[in-house]
Image (spheres, grey):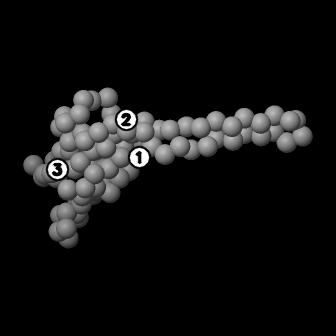
Amino acid sequence: MKYAIVEISGRQFWVETGKYYDLNRIPTELGKEITLNRVLLLNNDGEVLIGKPFLEQVKITGRVLEHLRGRKKIVYKMRPKKKTRKKQGHRQELTRVLIENISIN
């Protein structure tokens, strides 16, 4: 089983080929191929490579499937004994990316 741990937009993801992941919005058009090069760790069928901090020889290619919005999160602020309440909703802009290939140069 081949998998990698990748840093994308400040977060770290465990990625495998053939699966899709929801990342923070990437400003690209649909169907475009993207390359993830901030690879922290790669497990190639038991052979583990660890980057210091990144693995320069490993490239991960993915394809943008769709742009969507996440589930609504409620932000509720209340100051006790002041009669102030503020209820606000937030939906994060996301991009769904299908991981197609993990290659070692």
Label 1 Cα neighbours within 10 Å, binned few <14 / some 14-19 / many ≥20: few
Label 3 Cα neighbours within 10 Å, binned few <14 / some 14-19 / many ≥20: some
Mark 1 element type = strand
Please state the horizontal and vertical placement of residue 82, each as a whole percent of the image: 88, 35
**In the image: residue 74, left or right of residue 97:** right
Mark closest to the chain's N terminus, 1 or 3: 1
Please state the horizontal and vertical placement of residue 65, each as a whole percent of the image: 25, 41
The mark found on residue 86 in the picture is none
Quarter holding residue 8: top left
Query: Front-most of 49 and 72?
Result: 72
How far apart, in angstroms, are the residues tagged by discs 1 and 2?
Answer: 13 Å
The mark found on residue 100 in the picture is 3
Please state the horizontal and vertical placement of residue 62, each as a whole percent of the image: 20, 44
User: Does 45 appear above or below 95?
Assistant: below
Can residue 13 be seen by looking at this rendering? yes
User: Label 3 is placed on what type of residue?
Assistant: Glu
The mark found on residue 11 in the picture is 1
What's the residue at 27%, 29% (across, down)? 28
Disc 2 target residue? 25
Mark closest to the chain's N terminus, 1 or 2: 1
User: Label 1 is placed on what type of residue?
Assistant: Arg
Query: Front-most of 95 and 49?
Result: 95
**In the image: residue 23, left or right of residue 91:** left
How far apart, in angstroms, are the residues tagged by discs 1 and 3?
Answer: 20 Å
Can residue 8 be seen by looking at this rendering? no
